[in-house]
Amino acid sequence: MQNEINIPIILDAVRKVGNVFLKDYKQNAIPQTMDTLLKQLEDIDTLCLTSLKEDLSAEFPNTHWHIGDEFDTNSQRKPAEDQEYWLCDAMDGAIQYLQYIAGWTINLALIRDGKPFFSVIFDPLANEMFWAKDGEGAFMNGKLLELSRKTDPAIMLTVFEYGHQDKSDNDLNEKIGATITKLIRNYGIVRNYGPHGLQLAYVGAGRIDLFVQEDLDTYNWIAGLLIAKEAGAEIFTTAGNAWKWGSESLLVAPKKTAEKYLQIK
């Protein structure tokens, strides 16, 4: 395990499999049954993981692989015990992909000592590759990312998200509803876009001013979190505490924007 990693090899591997999916985009029928949907989602995971392993195993022979199953709430509460491993969200926004809708990406994160060390998000439709390495900044297609400098909430683009955590025996639905209401009352533009990691990368790129989510969704967040953080964004919980692995909410924005959001009652 070395601090210096071959970033071009990682980016090429992610771009390669992303372009395979791009070639097949809208070529299969939109699934009409649960069995068909689950089978197509499984096929996406298998194709993506197989391709990435083939292209990266020589460079990282001792690095294990973990699939980020966002339906498994408990596994998202803490990092795996491996000192170093790949955390692969085979396709963030796979439902959009299967429904012929834009907003799907290939996400990959290298976890080291319990935190993201390197991450990449590739949007094949836009041909945009976002990536970041811990302590070394965040980039898109080789260009350093810059946060939004907006100060007027009336022109800010804010987004809310929700995940697959069981909401049947808690107050999460009420929290989510209150958060959406808070955004609508205080910001000019409110959206729910879909691919969590890409939206976090968009915060880093200055395209989104504030991201907020009220439930646990670590696997969908982790690649985008490093990109947003390395671009200079603040990473909080919605209570204003520093986010850590296992936190059950997320607030990501430039510092002043985040602070103003937390002051809203």
Image (cartoon, grey):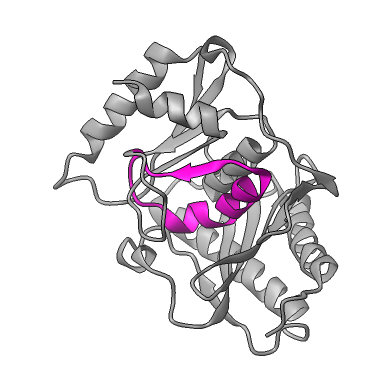
Residue depicted at 34% across the width and 64% down the height: 77
Q: Which residues are magenta?
A: 214-238
| 236 displayed left or right of 138 | left
Report the quarter where the C terminus lies. Answer: top left
Residue depicted at 77% across the width and 68% down the height: 10
As drawn, 12 above or below 248: below
Asked if residue 229 is among those painted magenta in the image, a careful observer would answer yes
Residue 96 visible here: no
Residue 4 visible here: yes
Residue 139: where, in percent of width, then height? 77, 48
Residue 68: where, in percent of width, then height? 48, 65
**Which of the pair 12/125 is nearer the observer?**
12
Asked if residue 97 is among those painted magenta in the image, a careful observer would answer no
| 226 displayed left or right of 15 | left
Residue depicted at 30% across the width and 66% down the height: 74
Residue 230: where, in percent of width, then height? 65, 50
